Amino acid sequence: MHDTEGGRALWAAYGIDASEPGLLKERRAAYAETVGRSADTVLDWEEQAVHELALRLLSAFYAGAPTPAQLPIPHGGYLLSSLEVVCVIQDRRFVESRQARTVISLVDGAPHFTYGTYSPTELSQIEGGTLALSKRMPGGVLHRIDFPEPLRRGQMHRFSFREKVPEAEPEPVGDQDFSGQSFESPTLRYRVLVHFIGDQPVVVWGYDKLTRIERPGEPNDGILLKPIDGRVSAEFADLYGGLCAGVAWRWT
């Protein structure tokens, strides 16, 4: 905090070194007189420091984050405030999902968000951005969503889309499946709802912070879930480091 004028102003505002704390207004006026600036200017410095500290704390909240004073920049330069997914499974096959993300940019000028999937999918009904690229790769498909304007550092933005499997390339059917995500960008909250139409699984469970090799784990190791009217939901928090979370099920 002592490395910037805003940090020093905020330090004084909290009265950390003051023998007689007094009121915030009095501490601010005393510091303003010391540095030869107006109280309004000092207040602006304090607010800038609060904004900066909030970004640092948000980006460093997750386990495994570096502890030095430098701001850690997660993969992609974003912190996800929330991810909400509704997934439709019909006759044991993935049909579509609807996804909404609220991101906070940790860099200036973030122009887009790249979403990857391991199976061929198509995006539509995009809100909060435009689909600029869908590129097939050996391991799946990358979709790039461009924002209306590049995001400023600390700016929050929400966007959503519908994801479908092409009718010509239906998902294979197996005895077990899952709806989940891997979290390269740290995410504060992830909520997933799965709607089963037709066949119903015999067991459903939630898995949290597993590696790709481990996922989706075993029912007894996760959180057992009971579908109601063919729907089941789960919520997860503090996701990071490429680990995976979601809902899994078995048909037999």
Image: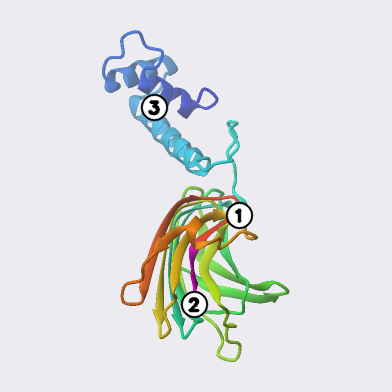
Type of the residue with mark 2: Trp
Q: Was residue 149 drawn as part of the magenta stretch in this picture?
A: no
Residue, disc 3:
42
The Cα–Cα distance between marks 3 and 1, rounded to whole angstroms, is 41 Å
The picture places residue 63, in percent across and down from the top left corner, at 54, 41
Locate residue 73: give its quadrant: top right
Callout 1 secondary element: loop
Q: Nearer the viewer, mark 3 or mark 2?
A: 2
Work out which residue is located at the far right of the displayed protein and give it. Answer: 138
Residue, disc 1:
242
Total labels: the figure holds 3
250 or 65: nearer the viewer:
250
The picture places residue 252, in percent across and down from the top left corner, at 50, 77
Type of the residue with mark 3: Val
Type of the residue with mark 1: Gly
Q: Residue at x 39, y 76 (%)?
A: 195
Q: Is residue 156 left or right of residue 182?
A: left
- Can residue 127 be seen at all in this image of the molecule? no
206 or 27: nearer the viewer:
206
Work out which residue is located at the far top of the displayed protein and give it. Answer: 19
Vertical arrangement, residue 95 with respect to residue 79, above or below: below
Vertical arrangement, residue 60 with respect to residue 214, above or below: above
Vertical arrangement, residue 214 with respect to residue 226, above or below: above
Residue, disc 2:
251
Q: Is residue 90 left or right of residue 73?
A: left
The residues colored magenta run 246-252
245 or 77: nearer the viewer:
245
Q: Residues within 10 Å of mark 1 (few under 14, many from 20)?
A: some
N-terminal of the pair, mark 3 or mark 2, is 3
